[in-house]
Image (tube, grey):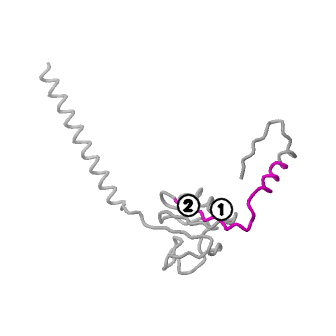
């Protein structure tokens, strides 16, 4: 759809005429609906903006696949209705059932790294940083003693 720009002196009636003309130029409703894949680089539940974008796409007739990590609950409008769901939008066989039927698919998975591994790595980095600091401090003290 073409974007319209309005001059500050335009009246609201001329703006509505421009918008209605643009709607007339839109493709016919007989075209197949779009399939949009929304990928969240993190926990889907902690990204309400992407959830609401997905909801808006659904309301406008698109098929939506929402992909991201498991974690927090989804917004109520996207919550599955089936009883065998695991709370993350997936039932036992990986499909998804909600008020949107086949138009919505939610794929949530565990991150490939564990928090304990990440904490251990951060602890190791801190230890290496302290050792480097102590080595540089020792080097500067020895250099100060030899220079004096």
Q: Is residue 141 left or right of residue 94?
A: left
Tell me the quarter of the picture where residue 55 sits. bottom right
Query: Which of the marked residues, 2 or 1, is nearer the chain's N terminus?
Result: 2
The residue lying at 54 percent from left, 66 percent from top is 73
The label shown at residue 38 is 2
Q: Is-magenta flag for residue 129?
A: no
Q: SS at mark 2?
A: strand
The residue lying at 65 percent from left, 74 percent from top is 99
The residue lying at 82 percent from left, 48 percent from top is 18
Name the one closer to the observer, 94 or 84: 94
Whole-number angstrom distance, CA of label 2 to CA of label 1: 10 Å
Percent position (x, y) of residue 96? 56, 75
Q: Is residue 140 left or right of residue 77?
A: left
Percent position (x, y) of residue 115? 36, 60
Percent position (x, y) of residue 6? 78, 41
Magenta highlight range: 16-39
According to the picture, the residue beneath numbered tag 1 turns out to be 57
- Where, quadrant-wise, is the C terminus in this rendering? top left
Q: Is residue 5 above or below residue 138?
A: below
> Residue reaching furthest left?
146
Q: SS at mark 1?
A: helix
Percent position (x, y) of residue 103? 63, 71
Q: How busy is the neighbourhood of tag 1: few (under 14 within 10 Å), some, or many (20 plus)?
A: some
């Amino acid at each position: 759809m073409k974007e319209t720009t309005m001059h500050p002196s335009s009246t609201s009636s001329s703006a509505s005429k421009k918008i209605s003309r643009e709607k007339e130029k839109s493709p016919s409703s007989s075209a197949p609906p779009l399939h949009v894949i929304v990928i969240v680089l993190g926990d889907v539940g902690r990204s309400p903006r992407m959830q609401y974008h997905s909801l808006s796409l659904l309301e406008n007739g698109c098929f939506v696949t929402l992909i991201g990590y498991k974690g927090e609950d989804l917004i109520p409008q996207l919550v599955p209705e089936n009883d065998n769901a695991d709370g993350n939008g997936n039932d036992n066989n990986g499909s998804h059932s909600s008020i949107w039927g086949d138009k919505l698919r939610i794929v949530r998975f565990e991150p490939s790294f564990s928090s304990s591994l990440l904490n251990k790595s951060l602890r190791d980095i801190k230890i290496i940083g302290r050792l480097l600091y102590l080595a540089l401090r020792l080097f500067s003290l020895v250099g100060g003693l030899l220079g004096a």
